[in-house]
Image (cartoon, rainbow, N blue to C red):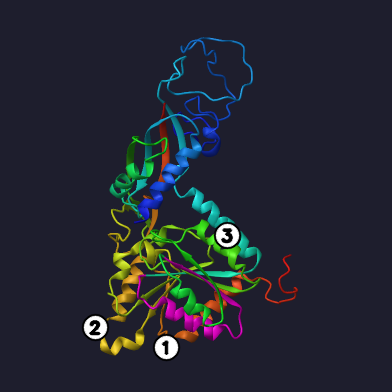
Amino acid sequence: MCATCGCSGTLAVESVALLTQGHDHEHGHDHAHDHDHGHEHQHDHGHEHGHSHSHDAPGPDSTAARTVQLEQEILGKNRLLAERNRGWLQGREIFAVNLMSSPGSGKTTLLERTVRDLGKETVVSVIEGDQETRLDAERIRATGARVVQINTGTGCHLDAQMLGRALQELSPAIGSLLFVENVGNLVCPALFDLGEGARVVIASTTEGEDKPLKYPHMFRAAELILLNKVDLLPHLHFDVDRFTAHVRLVNPSAKVLQVSATGGDGLPEWYRWLAARGASARPHPEPSRPEGVLT
Amino acid sequence: MHELSITQGIVESVCEAVPEGKVLAVTVEIGKLSGVVPDSVRFCFDLCAQGTRLEGARLDVIDVPGQGRCGSCQRELDMPELVTTCPCGNPFLEILRGRELRIRSVEVM
């Protein structure tokens, strides 16, 4: 419904097709349409016309300010591109995991270990997001996995357009597992849907237990929270139960797993989660198609 | 500072949606629970508008308050923050309002 006059026109895209009017959408009813004069008048000749009507009395004065109703989502473009990525990934039965965390949580170390461990049985590729350098991509490449680095420059997060370009460049194999390592930041990446299959947040025991409360948007958007560096717990004042309780306040349905990327603690459970969640992205697990052929 | 991207998005969307004329004002809705800080968007707006048809335009922000529903007692209540606990003790509320990030209208000459 039109938020301006309450009529049942469809806004957004078509509302700006004709900008000489206040706002436009298809109407079945008639409006004053004699543009020589801007006042209302009776007219008993009903005829169809699909042009716009205005709320600010359009007259012959073309320099007058007019209001154009947009009713447009600010993140609408990103959402559209994210859905395109999601469709592209689903069509190829690729399970894409968006990994998000603050800098220094051990994201890349966890990814290196995961790729080495799973790469023996599964085709794994990685998209690395950082503001600068190819350092992380080089670390991943050393594991033997295919990787594409995105440098966002001043940007503090990946967006759906960046991921779309990276997907074209990387061209991950059908039925493969794809990790997207987002820019280290607990704020901005939360707002940008990439079209991923799952969102995972990595927190670490060297950070505060209150991170879920301080960055609720990020933790609310994740379906799995990995608490990394649990091998350091004997040396730290970090209360795991308190951390988990804070996660529950923000996101009661999120699963929390304790892991250590260097010590190996909890990794089998992380791999089981990936396998189970990935299976839902691959309704046809049998590799019956010839490699590289899209159907 | 995702507000910079958000504000760039506002400027680009308006330029695409309004292909001609000088933009005098842009009205946006920013929900209290959207994760976007209106003051930061205001700060970025002049910068992002430079060199476009939005240069010098006014940015009007409509703040949309947060509102949620408790899954336990079905009560609807104000959500001043994303983490708001219901008086019944349930700390997790379904968000009904407050996530809005929307361009409402544009004033064009």
Mark 3 — on which chain does it sit?
A
Marks 3/2 in contact by CB < 8 Å: the verdict is no
Label located before the other in sequence (3 or 1): 3
Crowdedness near tag 3: few (<14), some (14–19) or many (≥20) residues, C-alpha within 10 Å:
many
**Residue A117 in the image: x percent, y percent?**
53, 86
Residue A115 in percent (x, y) is at 52, 81
Task: Tell me the amino acid under the disc marked 2.
Answer: His
For residue A166, what is the image quadrant? bottom right
Left or right: B69 in relation to A10: left
- First in sequence, mark 2 or 1: give its number: 2
Viewer-side label of 3, 1: 3
Q: Mark 1 points at which residue?
A: A265
Instruction: Find numbered disc 2 in the image and state the secondary structure of the residue it sits on.
Output: loop
Vertical placement of residue A263 versus A50, above or below: below
Mark 3 vs mark 1, CA separation in Å: 33 Å
Q: Do the residues labelled 3 and 1 touch (CB within 8 Å)?
A: no
Residue position marked by numbered label 3 in the rendering: A85
Q: Is residue B100 visible?
A: no
Q: In this view, does A95 lie to the left or right of A255?
A: right
Residue hosting label 2:
A237
Q: Amino acid under label 3?
A: Asn
Residue at (52%, 33%) from the top-left corner? A16
